[in-house]
Amino acid sequence: MPPPVLPVERCAACAAPAWRLAFARLRDAHEAYDAVQQAFLVAARKPGAVPAGDPWPWFRAVVAHEAKNLRRKKRPAPVGVGGEDDTREGTPMNVLDPRATEPAHAAAQSEGVRRLWAALDALPAVEREAVVLTSLGGLSHAAAAEALGVVRQTVTERARRGLEAVAARLRRGDDATAHALATLPVAGPPRGLADATSSWMAEAVHESTATSGATGLVVQGGTVVATSKAAWMVGVAVATALGFAGGAVTDGFGVFGAAAPEAGARSVAAPAVVDGPVAGRAPTIAASPAPLAAAGAPADEALRLRAENARLVATVADLEWTLASRPAVEGAKTRGPRFTFGEMGRLDAVRDADGPTLATAAKVTSDTIVEVYRKPQAGEPVPRDLLAHLQEHVEQMRKYEYRTLDRMPTAAQHNGELTHPISATNLLAGVLEQGGQPLTPSQAAEFERLGLAFEEEFARVRAAWTPTTPRARRLVDERRLKGRFMDGLWVALTEARRPRWVDPELRGFASLDLYDPTLMVIHTSPVLVGATAADVRSKLVGVLRGKLGLTAEVVDPRLDAAADAFVGRATRGLAAVPANRVKPYTFVEAMSTGEASAELVEALLRDLDLADGVRKARLEDPAWSVPRLVAP
């Protein structure tokens, strides 16, 4: 039987989140580098501990532990984005932000990033650690508690206080602050993440080979021979990255045979092992060939190849996962859910759900909704059979909703269960799998982390509700948390996978984005259409009078004041749209409307003398009034 692929190779895709976690904890690029390197060495020395499936939950615990050990030895000097460059090797640290693809965009964001780091640095040490581990580093509260050596509730309380303090300092809402922290760029390793990943993997693979002698690669006559198709893919990346003495890469990746090159052909030497980026670090493996630059290749070409090698290592991990998942993609009808995290994951309605059928129904429903919307925009009629096709698959999804109805905590009358993280993650996982792009281990781990974080936070929010908390306010709280959760899922996916969810241009549009939590309110929220804010106010007052049982003759300045406050907040900055685009509105517009609606209900209950029946009805009213201005 051929030897297996090294377990440490499965950790290659963990490099980027591992670096973010280490730097978030240590705030020192060189110590963070050492923490991640030690984690890779642990994986190499203890291959039996590396999980066969997704290594990230295990790997992040190792990274946290190694960072904790380094922090005990000496206190790091904080280095934040926007501060002074770390020039111990004359190389400024990079800023990692997948969204900042253009220098102008990065520059526009730099001031906000600097202020956010400054706000974090102003926190007490215990609160700062809790915030950076959970919000920046991506650890669950339980994992952060283990890393800090305290109980989970202590981490939860410290993280809450820290987040509130940062939000207050920046004069932003808690949700906006939490999102900014989750996507906050961090300083990269000196010489860049790609170079660091190549070095981490090289040293770890060397350690693993030296320790156990086991490898999925066999060196024969200076040529790397793979023992399987997946191992061959790993072999191309690892052999190139490690620069086996005498190794060569010929046309067609000539790694299987030992055939000599044609006469006169020039062999291309594999790049030598990259020296560690910290000053004074020796090369991780003594390489016989001279560095590429010394062999005549330009220095920038050497760096480019090294970066490409590191990318290949991470890509191989993704490809291996895709190959391993291919049987399910090509027809294995596994009915069980992909995710069963948290309390809701234990429901029989979730565990017994027909995953493939639901995923198919979700994708067809999503695509058909968009088609139904776009046809009138193009001046085309909506075929009757298209609507029937849509209804058929909506009914498939409703079977799941019926079984989960009233069994998942929600303030919504409609779609509260469908927008719960346990439902959204399983639907998206199924849709991606059927599309031939299953979640990678790190993406799946992030989905689960986000889902558990939601459940923890939602439980805390619900515990703060009282019998006098209006349903409109409860819906705002729930929808905000679900929106933050879905934003996290979106960020976790690659650009190639996102269109399987929804056309990126339609992300966050009510009714068009099947996974947007606005689904919770679209069926209970009247849309108030008017050419001006005054028109919207007139319609709102008419709706309120009906709900409060007031005739047109009754004049109450308190009602007028509440209506004015609503219109002033809900229409602030609202742009007029063509009449045929009144719907759909966006998540952001709905959140503004929701806040204004909750405040309106609270004002009515507080300021007006209402009969008991009317008061009870308003307390449980789920309606958000949605103002929409129509362009002339």
Image (tube, rainbow, N blue to C red):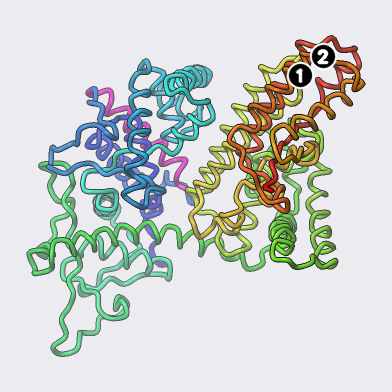
Residue at 86% from the left image edge and 23% from the top image edge: 545
Residue at image mark 2: 556
Residue 367 part of the magenta segment: no
Residue at 22% from the left image edge and 37% from the top image edge: 30
- What number is the disc on residue 622? none
* Image coords of residue 330 (percent x, y): 63, 68
Q: Secondary structure at mark 2?
A: loop
Tell me if residue 295 comes above or below residue 569 in the rendering: below
Q: Quadrant of residue 119?
A: top left
Judged left or right of residue 64, residue 414 is right
Residue at 32% from the left image edge and 42% from the top image edge: 107
Q: Quadrant of residue 501?
A: bottom right
**Closer to the camera, 447 or 347?**
447
Say which quadrant the N terminus sits in.
bottom left
Tell me if residue 565 comes above or below residue 420 in the rendering: above
Tell me if residue 145 comes above or below residue 323 in the rendering: above
Residue at 51% from the left image edge and 27% from the top image edge: 142
Residue at image mark 1: 560
Q: Where does the magenta region start and end?
A: 53-74
State if disc 2 and disc 1 touch (CB < 8 Å): yes
The amino acid on which the numbered mark 2 sits, given as a three-letter code, is: Asp
**Closer to the camera, 522 or 98?**
522
* Image coords of residue 473 (percent x, y): 70, 24
